[in-house]
Image (spheres, helix red, strand yellow):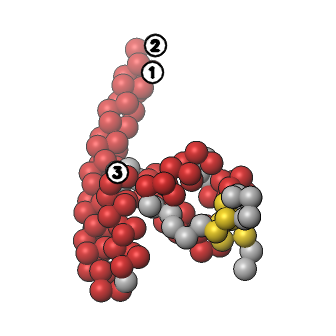
Amino acid sequence: MDTYTIGECARRSGFTMDTLRYYERIGLIEDIARTPTGQRRFTDDHLEWLSVLKCLRDTGMPVEQMHRFATLARDGDHTIPERIAILQAHKLAVDARMDDLAAKRDYLLGKIDYYKSVA
């Protein structure tokens, strides 16, 4: 299995090294092996999990909710219904933000059209 330094993992995942350290410290990422000198070694499984976390973070999920989701994922398949509920609630929040942004975009387009008409 391939392993990656924290710098390589940061480049591949899109997270900063500080964020990776923070996520490890708070328990969003677990089971990171260390070299004899203490350097972290991430795996492809970590990168796959980080892609989930990146999606959740980039869509505005609070860290506390991400932590709950991570805990449930580690607890096994019997937590799938609760994970679905978390993701569905988050999707509704994302949809609401998208609707709000679409309305604000439409307003901006109206202003642009107005200013073009009087210029």
Quarter-of-image position of residue 114: top left
Residue 63 in sight here? yes
- Please say if 39 is above or below 81: above
- Judged by depth in the image, the label closer to the viewer, 1 or 3, is 3
**At x 65% / y 73%, what residue is drawn?**
44
The residue lying toward the viewer, choosing from 90 and 7, is 7
The residue lying toward the viewer, choosing from 87 and 109, is 87
Disc 1 or 3, which lies upstream in sequence? 3
Residue 64 image position (x, y, % from top left)? 32, 54
Q: Tell me the distance, in whole angstroms, between the alpha carbons under discs 2 and 1.
A: 5 Å
Q: Secondary structure at mark 1?
A: helix
- Judged by depth in the image, the label closer to the viewer, 3 or 2, is 3
Cβ atoms under marks 2 and 1 closer than 8 Å: yes
Residue neighbourhood size for the residue with mark 1, other residues' Cα within 10 Å, grouped as few (<14), some (14–19), many (≥20): few
**At x 74% / y 64%, what residue is drawn?**
36
Q: Secondary structure at mark 2?
A: loop
Q: Amino acid at mark 3?
A: Pro
Q: Tell me the distance, in whole angstroms, between the alpha carbons under discs 1 and 3.
A: 40 Å
Q: In the rendered structure, find residue 119 and report the number of the disc placed on it.
A: 2
Residue highlighted by disc 3? 62
The residue lying toward the viewer, choosing from 113 and 108, is 108
**At x 32% / y 64%, what residue is drawn?**
68
Q: Is residue 90 left or right of residue 48?
A: left
- Please say if 53 is above or below 44: above
- Please say if 91 is above or below 112: below
Disc 3 or 2, which lies upstream in sequence? 3
